[in-house]
Image (cartoon, rainbow, N blue to C red):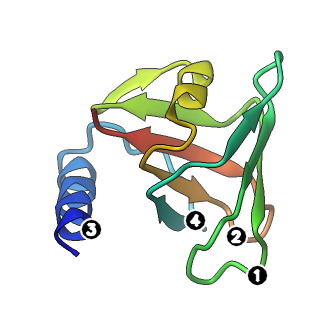
């Protein structure tokens, strides 16, 4: 419970500071303790076991437009692969199932 509160607080701070605010409406946020990500060599892939509120699917697509950030700084989408099995926050368009952003703090 405390870990969730800390993560929500960090997410709130990121949104308030505008450090990395690239989502476009509509988007749903999914926070996971164990990111299940699969990436191909071209930077596309999927995130499995999505459980976001308002989503009626459990797989989201990572496209060439998907972005990633670590500690508020934009990083390569390939660095998101290193988060496999670790906590991360994923913003996804609930209609197209496209991942907009993957964020995490270290």
Give x and y (percent) for residue 53: 56, 81
Residues packed near mark 4 inside 10 Å, few (<14), some (14 to 19) or many (20 plus): many
Residue under pointer 2: 94
CA separation in Å, label 4 and label 2 = 6 Å
State if disc 1 and disc 4 touch (CB < 8 Å).
Answer: no
Q: Residue at x 80, y 62 (%)?
A: 96
Q: Along the horizontal axis of the image, is 10 left or right of 60?
A: left
Q: Residue at x 27, y 37 (%)?
A: 19
Which quadrant does the N terminus fall into? bottom left
Please state the horizontal and vertical placement of residue 6, each as a whole percent of the image: 17, 61
Please tell me how crowded label 3 is: few (under 14), some (14-19), or many (20+) other residues with Cα within 10 Å.
few
Secondary element at image label 3 = helix
Distance (Cα) linking label 1 and label 2: 8 Å
Question: Quadrant location of the C terminus?
Answer: top left
Check disc 4 and report the residue beneath it: 27
The mark nearer the N terminus, 1 or 3, is: 3
- 4 or 1: tag closer to the N-terminus: 4
Labels 1, 3: front one: 3
């Amino acid at each position: 419970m405390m870990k969730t509160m800390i993560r929500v607080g960090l997410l709130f701070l990121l949104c308030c500071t505008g450090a990395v605010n690239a989502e476009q409406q509509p988007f749903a946020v999914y926070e996971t303790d164990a990111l299940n990500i699969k990436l191909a060599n071209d930077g596309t892939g999927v995130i499995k076991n999505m459980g976001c509120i308002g989503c009626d699917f459990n797989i989201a697509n990572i496209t060439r437009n998907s972005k990633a950030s670590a500690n508020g700084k934009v990083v390569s989408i390939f660095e998101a692969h290193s988060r496999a099995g670790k906590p991360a926050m994923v913003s996804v368009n609930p209609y197209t199932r496209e991942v907009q952003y993957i964020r995490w703090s270290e």
